[in-house]
Image (cartoon, rainbow, N blue to C red):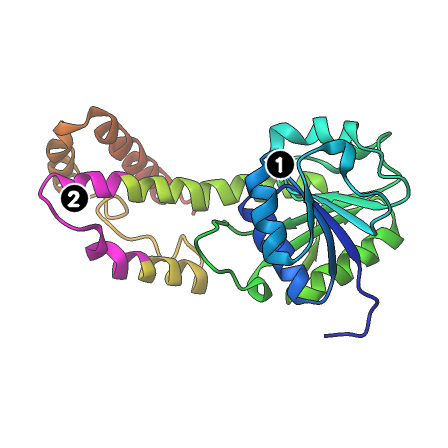
């Protein structure tokens, strides 16, 4: 921990990301001045945890904080950025798919503070291992964001809005799509009353290999071997769900295509 002056921070949003990020800043010694959420219960719950003030009225958001962190769904960002006068304070959003230009003409000092992780309120997160991607409208604000990020993470990365949208896209495919596959595999197991926990060691090993090696090197299964007999058998077993059957076929053919084309 450095001796840098701690910041006063207002959080706009009280969802999963806001909850984890505000708590990380709180533990790092920063002063969380206030929590805003349109949902009274959410604002109060997070504020009580942080021992700070809360509001569900945009007109009552405190002015003069060092930093305003907008941790809201992407489709709500523009509305809030345009509705609040941030004065000379630094304001950032946390969205991967929204560019920094959303602040142009609406704030003097602004940036993006994007933690690359999936968040849920029911799980504790160690921010030290999370890449935090920053972007700012000038060098001074970049230094502020870099220091804020370094207070909670060992992995601070400067990337621009164009890079960040591709990073977010890759994250959606790697994380959200993979979880959807887990949901589908659970449906397959349900056909024979098998518990999903049987797949846990397999899933953990898969993710560890993807972390230690390039995913191309760790691809296994019937498709990478182009084992049409197994693929056909699996497609037959999936007759209970034409949707999963179609997806299995499409993904298998794409794995075959990549490995036969030499693109991998």
What residue is drawn where x is 59% and y is 66%? 128
Please state the horizontal and vertical placement of residue 62, each as a whole percent of the image. 80, 43
Please state the horizontal and vertical placement of residue 240, each as a whole percent of the image. 13, 28
Q: Which residues are magenta?
A: 184-203
Q: Crowding near pointer 1: few (<14 within 10 Å), some, many (20+)?
A: some
Please state the horizontal and vertical placement of residue 88, each as a whole percent of the image. 91, 43
Decide whether residue 198 is among the magenta residues.
Answer: yes
What kind of element bears circle 2? helix
First in sequence: mark 1 vs mark 2: 1
**Residue that mark 2 sits on:** 189
What residue is drawn where x is 64% and y is 42%? 71
Classified by dominant secondary structure, the portion drawn in magenta counts as: helix
Q: For marks 1 and 2, give the CA distance.
A: 35 Å
Q: Nearer the viewer, residue 243 or 88?
A: 88
Q: Crowding near pointer 2: few (<14 within 10 Å), some, many (20+)?
A: some
Q: Nearer the viewer, residue 71 or 230?
A: 71
Please state the horizontal and vertical placement of residue 211, each as a whole percent of the image. 44, 61
Side (left or right) of 101 relative to 188: right
Decide whether residue 57 is among the magenta residues.
Answer: no
What residue is drawn where x is 51% and y is 45%? 171
What kind of element bears circle 1? loop
Side (left or right) of 237 relative to 19: left
Are the residues flagged by discs 1 and 2 in contact, CB closer than 8 Å? no
**Residue that mark 1 sits on:** 97
Res. 172 mark: none
Side (left or right) of 240 relative to 143: left
């Amino acid at each position: 921990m450095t001796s840098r002056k701690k910041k006063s921070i207002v959080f706009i949003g009280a969802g999963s990301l806001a909850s984890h990020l505000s708590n990380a800043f709180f533990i790092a010694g920063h002063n969380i001045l206030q929590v805003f959420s349109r949902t009274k219960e959410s604002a109060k719950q997070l504020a009580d945890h942080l021992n700070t003030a809360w509001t569900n009225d945009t007109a009552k958001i405190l002015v003069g904080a060092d930093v305003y962190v907008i941790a809201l769904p992407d489709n709500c960002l523009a509305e809030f950025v345009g509705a609040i006068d941030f004065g000379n304070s630094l304001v950032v959003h946390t969205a991967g798919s929204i560019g920094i230009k959303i602040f142009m003409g609406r704030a003097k000092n602004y940036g993006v503070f994007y933690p690359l992780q999936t968040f849920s309120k029911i799980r504790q997160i160690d921010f030290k291992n999370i890449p935090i991607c920053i972007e700012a409208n000038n060098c001074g604000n970049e230094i502020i964001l870099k220091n804020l990020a370094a207070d909670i993470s060992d992995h601070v990365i400067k990337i621009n809005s164009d890079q960040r949208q591709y990073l977010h896209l890759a994250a959606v495919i790697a994380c959200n799509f993979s979880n959807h596959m887990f949901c589908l595999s659970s449906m397959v197991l349900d056909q024979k009353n098998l518990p999903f926990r049987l797949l846990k060691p397999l899933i953990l090993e898969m993710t560890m290999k993807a972390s230690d090696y390039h995913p191309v090197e760790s691809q296994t299964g019937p498709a990478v071997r182009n084992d049409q007999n197994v693929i056909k058998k699996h497609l037959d077993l999936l007759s209970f769900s034409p949707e999963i059957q179609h997806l299995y076929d499409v993904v298998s053919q794409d794995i075959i295509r990549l490995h036969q084309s030499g693109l991998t």
